[in-house]
Image (cartoon, rainbow, N blue to C red):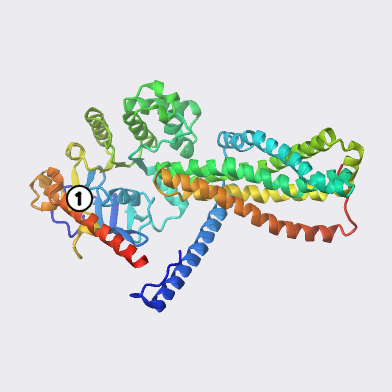
Amino acid sequence: MATAPSPSVGITGWLASQVANLGDTAIAAVAGIGDVSVFAFRTLGWIFARRQRRDVLIPCFYQIGVMSLPVVALTGLFIGMVLAVQSYGQFKALGLETRLGSVINLSLVRELGPVLAATMLAGRVGSAMAAELGTMRVTEQIDALESIGANPIYYLVVPRFLGCLILIPSLTVMADFMGVLGGYFYSHVLLGIDYHHYWNNSRQYVDVFDFLTGVFKSLFFGGAIALVSCHHGFHCDKGAEGVGRAATNAFVHSFVMILVLDLFLGIWLNNVHDFFRPEGPRRLL
Amino acid sequence: MNATAPATAAPRDAEAPPLVQVDSLSVRFGSQEVLRDITIDLAAGETLVVLGESGCGKTVLLKAMIGLVRPSAGDVLFEGRSLSQMSDRQLAHLRTHYGFVFQGAALFDSLTIEENVAFPLREHTRLPATEVRGIVASLIDEVGLPRSVLVKKPVELSGGMRKRAGLARALALEPTVVLYDEPTTGLDPIMTDVINELILRVRRSTVTSVVVTHDMNTARKVGDRVIMLYPLFRLRPGEPQIVFDGTLAELDRSPDPRVRQFVEGRAGTRLMELQEEQARANDSAAHDEEELA
């Protein structure tokens, strides 16, 4: 935090210390990015270097995929309904309430489905991974792995990375599906919007590309969550406080990564869409 | 042996080359220097006890011996081969010659005791599952644990049982060198002696051992040779960090007041020093607050 210069130090000294602090922060940030990058490359290297054992992969996949399904489905369902609640008034004022399906479903498959599925995964799985690996670091279990001649990245990071990467598309599809269902339920059953027009408008505006965009983005989100969370766990400070901080930072940094990736992937995918499909949208449903 | 050490090492076969050589090793974490210019030669079959007060770098030395901590200067050599020049793969292979017994056992929480002890065998051998189970059972017998623990998770075991399971895992690949990091810390006197007896039993099978401890009973019971490390911040410039290197008999006769204080377990002026340190820290914090104000 910047503080006022004291008379004994003088304004020049104070300015110098502020510049030094800024420099330290910049160096730490660059070193951090470099550290995560090296960690990511080592993880990618181990994916191809040696085949994973099934008895290590299956429990990991179960924890990441199966155990996350209920919370992701519930989130998708409610977000679909909330979108209907929030949009209905605006659309009704314009006499366009039958277009509600298009806005709900488009928002879901392009943005909210993948982002919320990833956020739930970061909260449920990312923090747990950081806490588990952090505890292993603090209790010397990672050192024990190395002392046995086993590679901790191969045993601890690669299964979690593969689990997030492979299973997040399924979780995204589940969030999309439950969101579409929730939006339809609220719009048709509770608001009384005609189902034929609801689906017809959805078909008109939601493209296969929109759906695939969301699923494609989720792959990057899953990979980022696993790498960021495992990195925090691996570099956890000592003690319960260190483990707690690693778990919190894993979620916060994963969430920031999801948002940043979402923006840049969104821009890039829009350009790809315009390049390959200048003729306009294709029907999904 | 450290050339600057004040005492003579245990007599051993001068012809035999050392199995492990710690050559002018220094380790630094950021601005904090933990080990400085440590030189130790470890002969095959020898049991070296590393003594020293908390925070003097004993565990760091042990971890540097197996390549878990990278030196900032100097090197560690195993059978003449430099650890710092080894690739990750070579280092992983080298570690199959070592067994490491961690202070808190460091058993893998998510695995059963059987899976923990079998882990090195599954990682480095292609033995059939039945043979692995047989080896694990014999190791568990060897460290005096009941076979009922095989299906249990580490969290279900007492501290002493976990340490013995950790020892069983360390012995799974029949290592040449076994490193013990404070093997008796936190155990009752009987369990402490059980662990000491197990260390002696392992030693009889011509294994080279390094035992890091601050328990004098353990040192007296298992050691052939003792070195004592001193915390760097308590040393004057130029003083060697190894303040003693010799046999147990020589340790008892050592005139060095730092060695005597540790061996006899006397606080001496340490409490006063700690209070002075605290006062200095408080003054410094108050000065910082004044500056901020």
Height in image: B158 above or below B215?
above
Percent across and percent down for residue A39 are 53, 54
Placement of B235 over or under A105, stated as above or below: below
Disc 1 packing (10 Å; few <14; some 14–19; many ≥20): many
Q: Nearer the viewer, residue B144 or A196?
A: A196
Spot occupied by residue B48 in the image (x, y as percentages of width and height): 23, 45
Image coordinates of residue B287 in percent, x first then y, are 29, 64
Left or right: residue A154 versus residue B183 is right
- The answer to whether residue B248 of the structure is visible from this angle is no
Residue nearer the viewer, A266 or B209: A266
Q: Nearer the viewer, residue B165 or B290?
A: B290
> Count of labels shown?
1
Describe residue A92's horizontal placement relative to residue B216 as left or right: right
Q: Residue at x 45, y 63 (%)?
A: A1
Q: Nearer the viewer, residue A49 or A179?
A: A179
Position of the C terminus of chain B by quadrant:
bottom left
Where residue B162 sits, quadrant-wise, is top left
Percent x, y of residue B210: 27, 44
- Please give the name of the residue rendered at 90% of the width and 58% of the height, measured from the top-left corner: A279
Q: Secondary structure at mark 1?
A: strand
Q: Dividing the image into 4 quarters, which one contains the N terminus of chain B? A: bottom left
Residue type, mark 1 in image: Met
Q: Provide the residue designation for mark 1.
A: B228
Indicate the chain on which mark 1 is placed.
B
Name the residue at 21% across, 37% down.
Answer: B218
